[in-house]
Image (cartoon, rainbow, N blue to C red):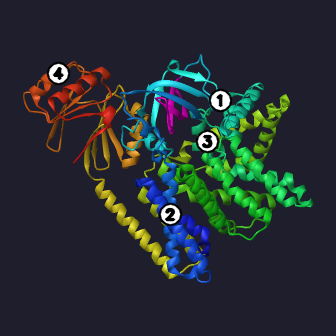
């Protein structure tokens, strides 16, 4: 394709595998720094000596590839603070038994959980040594105390804990998610375990937080409802912490969740508004340069106000490139412009590569610029209003086609009425954003009239009501769709090949499409055979026991929960979707299970374990049975002891000591996760 002739596209393609290599392999920082500098120097010298044949020599291409690849490894390695000598892991031996003195600075306020408020904090000191690194801070909710503020200093003496890993298969891996933000440990504390001090100075994040707090405080005077205020905070200030689960789920199922993230759509509209406001400067001397400067200042000021979240930074970076190109009227290729923004973002924030929003955002943009023009040309309506809505629909369809495989892979659902919600909301989003910015400015200056606040609240109410109505059409929301990494890769391969065929049909591309389809079918057949195995599973569930028996693509569940309760268990739904299984029956828990020549004895709260007919190979302890485990082991001599989340913590600790004393293997689902025996 002609787009690949642009150098920035090639450099971006080379940079990505470098970041991946730096992420998945521990590479010495000094070695990769030396290698990168060496190749960049060689590249510079060769460019000066052989300018005429630089872009035609394969050796130069190889050196550029290696230089960019090593740059990707370098930027990922240097962003991992564990490489730094002052990282807290280099200062102390991190264990969950040792308490340390910590001086922390609040960096970011996260969405609160059910029982805790959550913050990302930076380590300033650890055991009186200067240190750096980030932690997740969980503080028990306390209505008597105000939340912590950005830049606030806190002191505590506490244990560093590993962030919890998923305890059941196919659950969201929060530990992995936080590690990609370079956060590896957490603190879980009551409020009285921390000592608060005011900030010694304000960072740019702290100043933005103060402004947002003042805006929210001023808006509360006008009796905005919590749901309305949370949507305003998300739409205009990039803060989604206060959105309720119900409202958030409505937007997800209506296919309108992108509206709640300050992203390319919002920044694009704001850019158009700013361009219109400052258009009069074109008639001044150096007016175009002044206009570019003012537009960029306002865009980045807004990004800072919105907290410099990943979605805001990537959108503003992309539109910064577009704004410069548009105002300077330089000839440019849209793919090259997108590649420049991706390259710049990944160079300074390589962890964005693993951000779901980053992937969705750029796939949507690429799909719009690629698929929307041919879609729009399919029909040319006579009337202007029809053409306007057809343009919105074609853009929406193109974007959805681009993000569909990623949406199915990450969220396992597809909103069938996405085009309805977008056709109604997007035409008015410019008005909503423009009106909202005016509301915020007037509220900040204490000049907001009551009738304007009431009018804006009504608009937000209507939008929420419409989204809720769309999400209530359950038949149009396709949920729990099993979609693997293999499906993801082949889906995009097929989309790209079909697009190329429509652009320029040829036998070679048709043959490639056929090969991709056949390869995909062969892999599906292989996966189906792999999925025909059998397994016995002891799931982890706090205070409950849930067992599973998998036979091919069918799953039987044994528990004391009814089918309605089981359907509400998110971890069980994740397992069914992840393994592409069908739940065929639910039954009560039995005393014995037989699988693959193994015998499992279940001992419940009654503590009965006398077995005369056979010797069990495994024992499952549930509902805190009052048994002497050492005596039980001597009596039955099992090969493995298992206990799940239904048991008291004190019992589990005692059983662990007994198993270690008897040197018998044990599996504790609360620490090791679900027990799965495949056969």
Q: Position of residue 214 (x, y in %)?
A: 74, 30
**Which badge, 4 or 2, comes first in the chain's sequence?**
2
Marks 4/2: CA–CA distance: 67 Å
Marks 1/4: CA–CA distance: 63 Å
Residue at the spot x=46%, y=54% of the render?
A: 29
How many discs appear? 4
Residue on which the image places disc 1: 200
Q: Position of residue 350 (x, y in %)?
A: 54, 53
Residue on which the image places disc 4: 608
Report whether 228 appears left or right of 186.
right
Report whether 398 appears left or right of 33.
right
The residue stretch that appears in magenta: 112-140
Q: Quadrant of residue 53?
A: bottom right
**Which badge, 3 or 1, comes first in the chain's sequence?**
1
Q: Position of residue 457 (x, y in %)?
A: 76, 33
Marks 2/3: CA–CA distance: 45 Å
Q: Nearer the viewer, mark 4 or mark 2?
A: 2
Residue on which the image places disc 2: 36
- Whether 339 is drawn above or below 261: the answer is below
**Which badge, 2 or 1, comes first in the chain's sequence?**
2
Residue at the spot x=91%, y=61% of the render?
A: 285
* Residue nearer the viewer, 311 or 70: 70
- Whether 270 is drawn above or below 508: the answer is above
The reply to whether the magenta stretch includes residue 643 is no
Question: Element at badge 1?
Answer: loop
In the rendered image, the residue lying farthest to the left is 612
Residue on which the image places disc 3: 251
Marks 3/1: CA–CA distance: 40 Å
Residue at the spot x=58%, y=43% of the render?
A: 252
Report whether 398 appears left or right of 646.
right
Marks 2/1: CA–CA distance: 39 Å
């Amino acid at each position: 394709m002609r787009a690949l002739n642009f150098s920035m596209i090639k450099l971006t393609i080379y940079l990505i595998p470098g970041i991946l290599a730096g992420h998945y392999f521990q590479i010495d920082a000094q070695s990769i720094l030396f290698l990168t500098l060496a190749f960049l120097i060689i590249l510079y010298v060769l460019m000066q000596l052989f300018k005429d044949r630089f872009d035609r020599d394969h050796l130069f291409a190889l050196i550029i590839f290696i230089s960019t690849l090593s740059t990707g490894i370098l930027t990922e390695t240097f962003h991992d603070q564990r490489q730094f000598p002052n990282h807290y892991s280099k200062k102390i031996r991190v264990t969950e038994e040792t308490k340390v003195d910590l001086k922390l600075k609040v960096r970011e306020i996260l969405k609160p959980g059910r029982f805790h408020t959550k913050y990302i904090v930076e380590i300033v000191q650890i055991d009186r040594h200067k240190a750096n690194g980030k932690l997740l801070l969980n503080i028990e909710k306390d209505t008597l105390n105000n939340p912590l503020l950005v830049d606030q200093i806190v002191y505590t003496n506490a244990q560093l804990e590993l962030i919890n890993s998923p305890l059941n298969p196919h659950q969201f891996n929060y530990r992995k998610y936080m590690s990609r933000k370079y956060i590896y440990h957490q603190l879980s504390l009551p409020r009285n375990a921390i000592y608060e001090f005011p900030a010694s100075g304000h960072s740019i994040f702290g100043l933005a937080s103060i402004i947002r707090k003042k805006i929210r405080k001023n808006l509360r005077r006008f009796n905005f409802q919590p749901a309305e205020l949370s949507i305003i905070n998300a739409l205009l200030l990039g803060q989604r912490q206060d959105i309720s689960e119900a409202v958030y789920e409505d937007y997800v199922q209506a296919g309108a969740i992108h509206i709640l993230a300050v992203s390319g759509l919002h920044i694009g509209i704001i850019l158009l508004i700013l361009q219109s406001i400052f258009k009069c400067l074109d008639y001044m001397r150096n007016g175009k340069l002044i206009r570019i400067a003012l537009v960029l200042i306002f865009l980045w000021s807004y990004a800072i106000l919105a907290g410099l979240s990943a979605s805001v930074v990537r959108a503003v970076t992309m539109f910064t490139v577009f704004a410069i190109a548009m105002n300077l009227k330089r000839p440019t290729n849209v793919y090259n412009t997108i590649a420049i923004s991706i390259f710049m973002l990944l160079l300074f924030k390589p962890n964005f590569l693993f951000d779901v929003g980053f992937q969705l955002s750029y796939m949507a943009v690429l799909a719009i610029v690629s698929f929307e023009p041919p879609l729009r040309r399919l029909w040319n309506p006579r009337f202007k209003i029809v053409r306007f809505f057809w343009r919105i629909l074609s853009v929406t369809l193109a974007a959805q086609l681009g993000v569909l495989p990623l949406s199915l892979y990450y969220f396992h659902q597809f909103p069938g009425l996405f085009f309805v919600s977008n056709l109604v909301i997007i035409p008015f989003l410019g008005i909503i954003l423009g009106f909202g910015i005016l509301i915020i400015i007037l509220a900040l200056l204490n000049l907001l009239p009551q009738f304007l606040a009431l009018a804006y609240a009504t608009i937000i109410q209507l939008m929420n009501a419409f989204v809720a109505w769309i999400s209530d059409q359950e038949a149009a929301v396709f949920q729990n769709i099993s979609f693997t990494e293999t499906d993801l890769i082949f889906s995009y391969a097929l989309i790209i090949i079909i697009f190329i065929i429509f652009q320029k049909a040829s036998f070679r591309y048709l043959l490639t499409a056929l090969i991709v389809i056949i390869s995909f079918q062969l892999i599906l057949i292989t996966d189906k055979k792999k999925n025909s195995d059998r397994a016995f599973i002891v799931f982890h569930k706090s205070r409950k026991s849930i067992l599973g028996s998998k036979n091919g693509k069918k799953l039987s569940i044994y528990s004391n929960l009814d089918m309605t309760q089981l359907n509400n268990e998110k971890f069980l739904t994740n397992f069914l979707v992840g393994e592409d299984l069908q739940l065929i029956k639910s039954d009560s828990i039995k005393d014995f299970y037989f699988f693959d020549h193994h015998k499992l004895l279940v001992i419940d709260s009654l503590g009965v374990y006398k077995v005369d007919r056979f010797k069990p190979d495994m024992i499952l302890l549930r509902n805190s049975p009052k048994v002497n485990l050492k005596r039980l082991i001597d009596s039955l001599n099992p090969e493995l002891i298992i206990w799940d989340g239904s048991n008291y913590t004190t019992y589990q600790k005692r059983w662990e000591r007994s198993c270690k004393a008897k040197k018998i293997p044990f599996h504790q689902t609360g620490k090791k996760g679900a027990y799965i025996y495949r056969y």
